Amino acid sequence: MIRCTIGRGQRLQSINSRHLSTMNHPSKIRSVALGQTKLTVTNFGLGSAQFGWLFAPVSHAQATATFNRACELGIRFFDTSPLYGRGIAEARLGRVLPGLPRDSFTLSSKVGYAIEPDDAVPDGESTANPEPRGHDFSYDFAMRSLEGTLRRTGLSRVDILLIHDPDDHMEACLQGTYKALYRLREQGVIGAIGAGMNDAGKLAWLAKHAQFDCFLMAGRYTLIDQTAHDELLPIAKAQGIAIYVGGPFNSGLLADPFAPNPKFNYDTAGREWVDKAQRVATVCTRHGVDIKAAALQFPLGHPSVVSVVSGPRSVAELEQNVEAFNAPIPAELWDELRHEGLLPDTVPTP
């Protein structure tokens, strides 16, 4: 039986039909293998950057309610990082994760930003998003960073540990952080090692120079941006590297292409991207499909993509995303997007 928690120290609550009453379609959320590892993840995951005040503040109560609702809806894959609010996102997960049976979920966190184990800001209702003090990709810091993550989350282990944004430190991260993560995996302390980046080309470089189990790729394999398709994804398929896709809405543009001043990949969207997203949305409307549904389901069409990770800020936004993930999409939609030149013919679709 699937169970979820209301908060640390409170009893577990069984899922029942009441929890799913807002869902209009059968759930597509299921557990899948994480590449060649012994781990499993749900094909729809919950990101936690928003719990660390990404773009706007989120209260304790809102973060906890969103997490608990994710559990109720069957999500068992959670991604976090010390970067998110300089430890706040991890600390907020630490309010609820210890109340779940440890083998019932998979947690991914990261190392690389210079945030010490005791460096997290107080877990208050601040509206600031604290900035890290640069990067540290040394072997010793990776070990210390993991200690901090375990302390903040209240857990005895992390399942997946990623090298976080080594864009300008590629060689250094292989000489330091990677060796630490490799040793931790050999010792059984973590189950999988990987990297989390926005740059698909640099993830491909890492795959050519070391052995990885998985990559978190943000915003480069989406409904309007398939940068990763030609190089990274073929390498991932050949090497058995599992990919989970973050930023499936490209920071908001694919959630609502007609919104004023939409963001695209953490910045203001350029006119060419807005135009493309609006054309895609128009095609979706002709087929009776919400563009959010197409955006969330598209990445899973590739055999190397095991999960799509979204970062809702509230219960309502989470429920909308899950409903979109579960929505049926006719094959004719993908066909028309190809016909209109909005999807390459070579890109696989669900």
Image (spheres, rainbow, N blue to C red):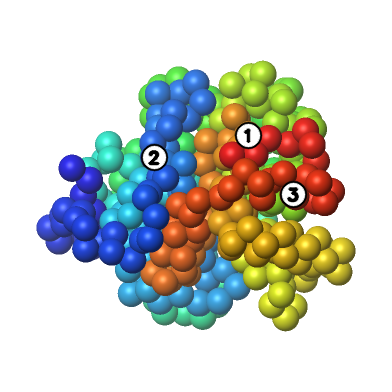
Name the kind of residue labelled 2 in the image: Arg
Q: Are marks 2 and 3 in contact (CB under 8 Å)?
A: no
Q: Position of residue 286 (x, y in %)?
A: 67, 62
Q: Secondary structure at mark 3?
A: helix
Q: Are marks 2 and 1 in contact (CB under 8 Å)?
A: no
Name the kind of residue labelled 3 in the image: Glu
**Is 297 located above or below residue 285 in the figure?**
above
Q: Secondary structure at mark 2?
A: loop
Name the kind of residue labelled 1 in the image: His
- CA neighbours of label 2 inside 10 A, class few (<14), some (14 to 19), many (20+): some
Say which quarter of the image contains residue 5.
bottom left
**Is 120 located above or below residue 209 in the figure?**
below
Give me the residue at 71% from left, 24% from top. 235
Horizontal side of 86 relative to 220 (left or right) equals left
Q: Nearer the viewer, residue 102 or 337?
A: 337
Horizontal side of 118 relative to 269 (left or right) equals left
Horizontal side of 220 relative to 155 (left or right) equals right
Q: Position of residue 54 (x, y in %)?
A: 57, 68
Q: Secondary structure at mark 1?
A: loop
Between the residue at mark 3 and the residue at mark 1, the CA separation in whole angstroms equals 19 Å
Between the residue at mark 2 and the residue at mark 1, the CA separation in whole angstroms equals 16 Å
Q: Which residue is mark 3?
A: 336
Disc 2 or 1, which lies upstream in sequence?
2
Give me the residue at 63% from left, 34% from top. 302
| Front of the two marks 2 and 3 | 3
Q: Which residue is mark 1?
A: 302
Q: Quadrant of the N terminus?
A: top left
Disc 2 or 3, which lies upstream in sequence?
2
Between the residue at mark 2 and the residue at mark 3, the CA separation in whole angstroms equals 28 Å
- CA neighbours of label 1 inside 10 A, class few (<14), some (14 to 19), many (20+): some
Instruction: Return the mark for residue 30.
Output: 2
